[in-house]
Image: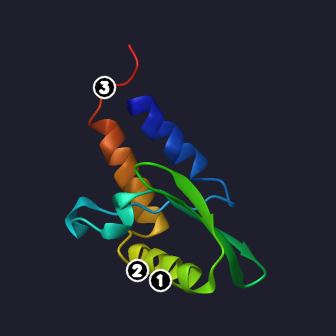
């Protein structure tokens, strides 16, 4: 786990990668019930990939895309800043033993 967290911290240094952690203090959030990805072209959401326990599917219906965007924005409002997220990742890495 230590090596994985250090790797995550390292890639968070890249300018094109933004990792933001939802802290445990935020509690549960329904957006964390399944994985999703949003495809944006220009300034518009064009599609979303949603996973459930049984399957994954691509959504292109505007009402669904609006809901997914709202869920993402709500979840993101609960995250730590980029710097605070990196600090927490390194704190967690320190909680695990490094390689022997």
**Left or right: where does residue 57 sit relative to residue 34?**
right
Mark 1 burial class by Cα count in 10 Å: few <14, some 14-19, many 20+: few
- Under circle 3, the secondary element is loop
Q: How is the image coloured?
A: rainbow
Task: From the image, tell me which residue sits under label 1.
Answer: 70
Residue 13 image offset from top left, x and y in percent? 60, 53
Task: From the image, tell me which residue sits under label 2.
Answer: 74
Q: Residue at x 38, y 70 (%)?
A: 79
Q: Earlier in the sequence, mark 3 or mark 1?
A: 1
Give how far apart the Cα atoms at labels 2 and 1 are: 6 Å
In this rendered view, identify the residue nearer to me: 82 or 50.
50
**Mark 2 touching mark 1, by CB under 8 A?**
yes
Task: From the image, tell me which residue sits under label 3.
Answer: 97
- Under circle 2, the secondary element is helix
Relative to 43, say whether 2 is above or below: above
In this rendered view, identify the residue nearer to me: 53 or 25.
53
**Mark 3 touching mark 2, by CB under 8 A?**
no
């Amino acid at each position: 786990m230590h090596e994985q967290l250090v790797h995550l911290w390292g890639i968070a240094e890249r300018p094109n990668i933004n990792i933001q952690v939802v802290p445990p203090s935020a509690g549960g959030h329904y957006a964390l019930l399944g994985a999703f990805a949003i495809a944006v072209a220009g300034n518009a959401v064009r599609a979303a990939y949603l996973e459930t326990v049984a399957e994954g599917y691509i959504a292109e219906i505007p009402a669904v895309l609006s809901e997914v965007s709202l869920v993402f924005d709500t979840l993101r409002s609960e995250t730590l800043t980029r710097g605070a997220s990196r600090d927490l990742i390194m704190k967690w890495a320190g909680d695990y033993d490094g390689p022997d």
